[in-house]
Amino acid sequence: MADNAVLEKDPLQQPPGVEGTMERRIRFPMVPDGLYRAILATVAGVFCLVMVALVVTLVIKARPAFAHFGFGFLTGTTWDPVHAKYGALPFIIGTLETTAIAMVLAIPVGLGTALFLVHAVHPRLRAPLSTAVELLAAVPSVVYGLWALLVVAPWARTIIEPALASITGSKGPFSGPQLGIGLLLAGLVLFVMVLPTMVAISRDVIASVPGEEVEGAYALGATRWQVLWRVVLPSARVGLLGAVTLSMGRALGETIAVTMVIGNSTAIAHSLFAPAATLSSVIANQFTEATEPFHLSSLIALGVVLLAVSVVVNAAARLLVHSVGRQSSASVALV
Amino acid sequence: MTLIEGQDRNLVRRDEIQKLATASEGRRKIYSKVGLTICGLFLIIALIPLISVLAYTVQRGVHAWSVDFFSKLPTPAGIPGGGIWNAIVGSLIIDGIAAAVAIPFGIACGLFLAESDGPIVGTVRFATDVLSGVPSIILGIFAYIVLVISLGHFSAIAGSFAIGVLMLPIIIRASETAIRSVPSTLREAGLSLGSRHSTVSRRVILPAALPGLITGVLLAVARGVGETAPLLFTVIGSEYFATNPTQPMAALPLVVYGDGIQAYPDLQLRAWGTALFLICVVLVLSVGSRLIAARLGRVKR
């Protein structure tokens, strides 16, 4: 059909004697092959240049901070614009903690959902459920942030945090005042936000496990759970690792929803209920207030750290996912 | 060991295995039930927050919607009757400029990736992959350095730049996939008629790949419209009606962010209304791209 659609438009398909079409065709500018290739290569080259410029400009603007603080920038625990002391450690810890909360929840829930979608759900429900999950990945992050701040934060203050505190006896990470906004809420929002990505990619990876292996296991009398646990998961493990890494990359870099709910404190949080900040949230929060050059440079230096981490994580994830091969167009668009 | 002894041993082992299998059957079935139930519960756990986001946005956002909401400028907290008209126009301008540059550029890159080979192709593909994983706030910083510092003031065009760079990897990857899926026989037929590569691309390849291209473009625009972080310190937002792209401008995601974090209920209501509008726009674009992709699939079969 596609072939026909194209051929119908092709003037050469028209009956002989319709001379005008050939004439009209020649009137279009004929770009020589060499020039055509050169144009495409130039566009691609410009794209690469933009990428290089992205890295170079950030590094140049961040240099004053790196030059002044050296390695201590990464290990410094104080971020104090008033006294021009800048250390990135509170935000690196904040980023790792929120991402860890999100992934601890997203890995089992996302994997379970993907397994259920591919192997257990009624075929008629499979497509609508998958579509629903994917459409939710398209919901802008600022909307998740609004929902988390105005709907979930009160629940966190009155239900989730008191419950966690009473179960654990208010010790260690579950101590301190229950504010609603803080590390825990930011982690929970990230969990909700990376879930569609996690489900969509793991679903594709799980669906690409060879049918012969699955059928073979069933033929040997394995139960459905045994097939999932001993055949599907081991066979899909590389791709699933890729899905996890990719979701992690999203959680590390997510900005606006986290900024809205984390409380934006530049001190290292000693409780999950306490306000904190991540690399991206402190940039979003302080960038326009940074009048002092060192402040701006240090914020951009945080950006360089974030860029480096996300490039490494995403490159690793892509290698893992690509090694599995087949992906639906939907999940290609997601990642 | 004689042959018979070996056979005997095999028979014994088969018996043992059979016994074990029957004995474990009940347990295995229970395990299976429990495991699948947990997976099903996870599906429900996954759906609850996602449904909750949509339900709350619709329930609260609808109350903000009115004719004034879509046609008036914003009013300060406490003064009723304001709207988001300037943000709608602002988002149209910002994302329009971004798309106008990113779409042809991205499709050209996609053509390059699909039709060439060599070391540059690998580099471009790697750059695309890396860029799609770069947090959007980094693109905001990039646009700030390139366009805000050099121009000396915040501007909508800087936001367009950041959003355009954000759209590029999505468009490039979708168009490469779409162009690759065009049967090579079509290209060869065109070339064998004596057409040049550029003619074959324009008259055969791109028309055949059109549904895939449109899908990619719509997804990229949907993504760009909802992004907030790259606009924070480029477009910066505005209370006024502005159409000059070299000046600060209002934008829909900035309204949701800026009004949502205020303590005034009427501003929060405006944030909900804008969020609902944003979700509608994004879902229309996503569903549209899906319908086109589905049609493409049907045509192919």
Image (cartoon, grey):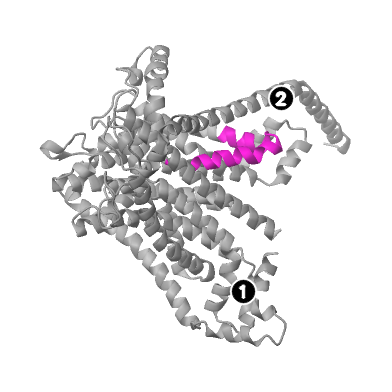
Chain that bears disc 1 = B
| Mark 2 secondary-structure assignment | helix
Q: Dot 2, crowdedness within 10 Å: few (<14), some or many (≥20)? A: some
Question: From mark 2 to mark 1, how far is it between C-alphas?
Answer: 55 Å
The residue singled out by tag 2 in the image is: B28
Task: Name the residue furthest left.
Answer: A83
> Magenta part mainly helix, strand or loop?
helix
Q: Which residues are magenta?
A: A111-140
Identify the residue shown where x is 41% and y is 26%: A151
B165 with respect to A118 (left or right): left
Identify the residue shown where x is 50% and y is 36%: A195
The C terminus of chain B sits in image quarter: bottom right
x and y, in percent, of residue B166 in the image:
39, 54
Where is A20 relative to A53, above or below?
Answer: below
Task: Name the residue furthest right.
Answer: B4
Where is A236 relative to A325, above or below?
Answer: above
Instruction: Residue A273: say if magenta.
Output: no
Q: Amino acid at mark 1?
A: Arg
x and y, in percent, of residue A198 in the image:
52, 40
> Dividing the picture into quarters, in which one does residue A275 lie?
top left
Q: Amino acid at mark 2?
A: Arg
Find residue B187 and name its label. Answer: 1
Where is A1 relative to A117, above or below?
Answer: below
- Out of B224 and A63, give the one closest to the viewer: B224
Residue A78 seen in the current view: yes
| Mark 1 secondary-structure assignment | helix
B141 with respect to A293 (left or right): right
x and y, in percent, of residue B161 in the image:
33, 57
Residue A233 seen in the current view: no
Q: Are marks 2 and 1 in contact (CB under 8 Å)?
A: no
The N terminus of chain B sits in image quarter: top right
